[in-house]
Each structure stands twice: as structure tokens, then as C-alpha cells.
Image (tube, rainbow, N blue to C red):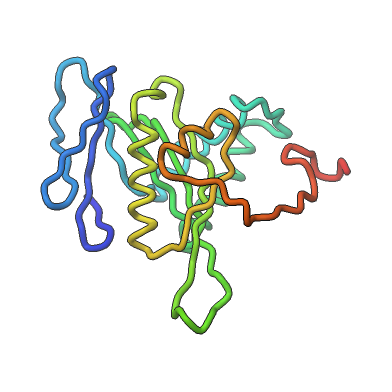
Amino acid sequence: MWSWGGADVSVFTRVSGLGATLGYDGALRARNVRLAGQVHVNYRMATFEDVPRLAAARWAFRRESGEAPVETETAFAGRFERFAREALASGRWTYWIAETDDGTLTSQMAVCVVDSVPRPSRASDQWGYLTDCYTSPAFRNEGVGRELLARVAAWAKSRDLELLLVWPSDGSQRFYARAGFDRDEDIRVLRLREYDASPGSL
């Protein structure tokens, strides 16, 4: 159980082709009862203890996307874990995860909170960069990613973030559109290198 905006939150999704079920009781609350033929998925913010699992999921995510690694999985895990621990400790990064009752990581999303340049009309002005969004293949099309994104959006709103910005893949365009993410023609991007370009390859 954790809280955001003063509300304790512990929600679950029932996965087995039966769709998603959320328990509402003032705040969002879960009924942690295992039913036959169902897998309960719990949603929460990640802690330092989750970092090794996040590293493994990140490796699986990028390998599934077709990236050719420049180091071993063990070396990458060490590099990711150092980054993630520093990021979480800084308070600028927050990971949200979905996991089954037995601790299997099923989905993850990361938000980096960016401070905007101060302006006279607001005492605080921030927005969120949404990235590292991955659901393991066995839990796709079951509503797990949708429910996790809903928790992330609600948390971001409770933090008074101006917006969440994401660079979706071609295959995830509809997923984010259904969640309310719009295309913004006001943004201009100066691309300085290809995303998968190796260091020193230009």
C-alpha cells in the first residue's frame, strides 16, 4: 500500500482473458484474493529492491526491439542498476511497475520530472518525460499496460505536472492515443543523430 495525493492506493488487475477489474472504495483498493484461473497484478511505484528486475526487463525490451548489444547482459545490468539507483535517489525519476503476487515483473514505465524555466505566473512548473514503457509478452493485450499507464497519469496529475511527453513506437501509437495522448504540432525536433547510432559512428 502506498499513497499519492493523500489517497492510499493498491489496485489489481485480473488477467486470464477476463479483462481488467479495479476495486474502488473511496480510494483505489485491492482485494488480494487469488481466484482459480486468474493472475492478480498489483501496481505500485518501484523501490531500490526492484532495480535488478528493471534491468532485466530493460535488456529484454531493447533486445526485442532489435538492438544489437555492445556489451554482455551482465555488464549492461551493472550499468543500468547504477543509473537507476542514482535516478531514483535523486527524486527526478520515478518507475511504476506491475507485478504478479509471486513477484513476477509484468510491466514498467519510467517518468523523468523536468523542471521548466521559472515564470512569473507559477511558483512551480514541471512536466514529465515518459519512457522505458514495456510489458512482457505473456501479459500483453490483457489490460495490464493500460491500467499501469492510468496510474502513472493519475500520479502525474497529482504532482501538478503540465504534461507527459512520450515518443511512441509505430506499434504503440494507438495504445497512447486511447489513453488520451494527442499529437502536438507545436513541437519541433532537431535530430542530431539516429537513435541507434553507435558512439563515434558519425
Quarter of the image with the C terminus in it: top right
In the image, residue 156 above or below residue 35: below
Residue pictured at 66% horizontal, 25% vertical: 66
Q: Position of residue 83 (x, y in %)?
A: 57, 51
Q: Position of residue 186 (x, y in %)?
A: 63, 56
Residue pictured at 13% horizontal, 36% vertical: 31
Q: Position of residue 140 (x, y in %)?
A: 41, 24
Q: Position of residue 157 (x, y in %)?
A: 36, 58
Residue extending furthest toward the bottom? 120
Along the viewing direction, whichever of 161 and 36 lies nearer the viewer: 161
Taking the image as shown, residue 20 lies to the left or right of residue 31, namely: right
In the image, residue 194 above or below residue 102: below
Tag count: 0
In the image, residue 157 above or below residue 191: below
Residue extending furthest toward the top? 37
Residue extending furthest toward the front? 185
Query: Residue 136's quadrant in the figure?
Result: top left
Residue pictured at 35% horizontal, 31% vertical: 144
Residue pictured at 53% horizontal, 34% vertical: 173
Taking the image as shown, residue 94 lies to the left or right of residue 154, namely: right
